[in-house]
């Protein structure tokens, strides 16, 4: 499946490191939608992760596949 694009998708995770995936907790700030609301199982997406400390130094951009039943966004190699 090709990449899926959606507006205002944000979520939070406590997963750290550079492993193959991260678990999203399903909470989005006001005005945004979660990955659960925006995507279907198996959708491929381009994502950006920011550590929210406003330094702009800890940012990651990549592609991943969404697994809805486990709320895991798996990084694509």
Image (cartoon, helix red, strand yellow):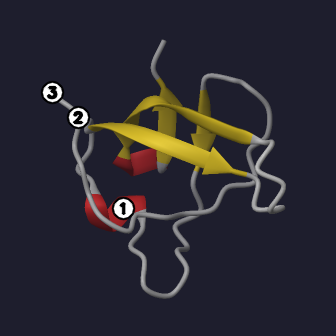
Q: Mark 3 points at which residue?
A: 1
For the residues labelled 3 and 2, the Cα–Cα distance comes to 7 Å
Tell me where residue 44 sits by quadrant.
top left
Residue at 79% in and 40% down: 16
From what the image shows, is residue 53 above or below residue 2? below
Residue 74 lies, in percent from the top left, at: 49, 31
Q: How crowded is mark 3: few (under 14 residues within 10 Å), some or many (20 or more)?
A: few
Marker disc for residue 3: 2
Residue 29 lies, in percent from the top left, at: 55, 80
For the residues labelled 1 and 3, the Cα–Cα distance comes to 17 Å
Residue at 22% in and 43% down: 4
CB of mark 3 within 8 Å of CB of mark 2?
A: no
For the residues labelled 1 and 2, the Cα–Cα distance comes to 16 Å
Q: Which of marks 1 and 2 is in front?
A: 2
Q: Mark 1 points at which residue?
A: 36
Residue at 26% in and 36% down: 42
Q: Which of marks 1 and 2 is nearer the N terminus?
A: 2
Tell me where residue 22 sits by quadrant.
top right
Residue 7 lies, in percent from the top left, at: 30, 64
Q: Which of marks 3 and 2 is in front?
A: 2
């Amino acid at each position: 499946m090709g990449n899926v694009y959606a507006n205002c998708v944000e979520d939070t995770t406590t997963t750290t490191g550079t492993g193959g995936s991260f678990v999203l907790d399903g909470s989005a700030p006001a005005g945004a939608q979660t990955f659960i609301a925006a995507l279907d199982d198996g959708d491929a997406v381009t994502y950006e992760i920011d550590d929210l400390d406003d330094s702009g130094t800890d940012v990651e951009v990549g592609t991943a596949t969404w697994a809805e039943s486990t709320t895991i966004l798996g990084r694509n190699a």
